Image (cartoon, rainbow, N blue to C red):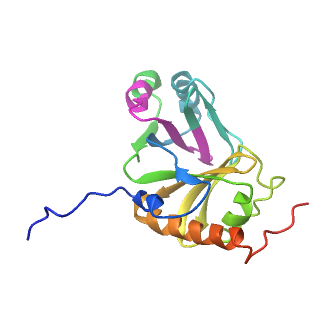
Amino acid sequence: MSDAGLVPTTPLAVLNTLSMPGLSAAGELTRHVLRGRAGIHAPAAEVLGFALPVEACRAAGAGGRHALWLGPDEWLLLAPAGDRLDKALAFAAGDAAYSLVDVSHRQVGLILDRPDASAVLAVGCALDLDIAAFPVGMCTRTLFAKADVVLWRTGENVFHIEVWRSFADYLCRYLAQAGVEFAGGRRTPPAQD
């Protein structure tokens, strides 16, 4: 069997076939999951250029690097592609106990940027995404339909969504369908207070 006619695709290739205003790829990022107790805070701040967020479900960032709080001792670190956080943190951490796992090839990011972004996401997510309940800078691990995602609000109507590659096509198609329903007037977004 010849594979000469096969064309490699990326997990987000489906975005080229969907008509979904405001949905795009987050771009190439380096992704790490950092686990560690208090001893990792100072070395991580030295490497990242900002303190790890310690308030539940909050993100912090500077210089293109971001840390999203996922648990009391767990953060998702996002940085520009090729950023070598692993080597810098290993040097800075010294004897501090921590775990840093590169998940760059496990997941991809999407950006949903449209006036009805909260309502579109509410179609598949049970969280209260009203700006008062889920303000800018808030992030959490949650389910969107049947996909495990990390949802991060980066603007009033802008969300960064991290999803495993194997669910990327499904999530994009689900979001596109939800967006079409709102754009076509078949559904009315919930009233905002």
Name the residue: 57% across, 36% down. 66
Give coordinates of residue 94: x percent, y percent. Answer: 43, 23
In this rendered view, identify the residue nearer to me: 134 or 109. Answer: 109
Q: Is residue 72 above or below residue 52?
A: below
Name the residue: 56% across, 38% down. 37
Based on the displayed image, in which of its 4 quarters is residue 136 positioned? Answer: top right
In this rendered view, identify the residue nearer to me: 182 or 70. Answer: 182
In this rendered view, identify the residue nearer to me: 11 or 135. Answer: 11
Residue farthest along the right direction in this orientation: 193
Q: Is residue 16 left or right of residue 141?
A: left
Name the residue: 57% across, 26% down. 63
Give coordinates of residue 182: x percent, y percent. Answer: 71, 70
Name the residue: 52% across, 40% down. 77
Q: Is residue 88 magenta?
A: yes
Q: Quadrant of the C terminus?
A: bottom right
Q: Is residue 141 left or right of residue 130?
A: left
In this rendered view, identify the residue nearer to me: 78 or 117. Answer: 117
Q: Is residue 163 visible?
A: yes
Q: Is residue 158 magenta?
A: no
Residues rendered magenta in the picture: 67-89
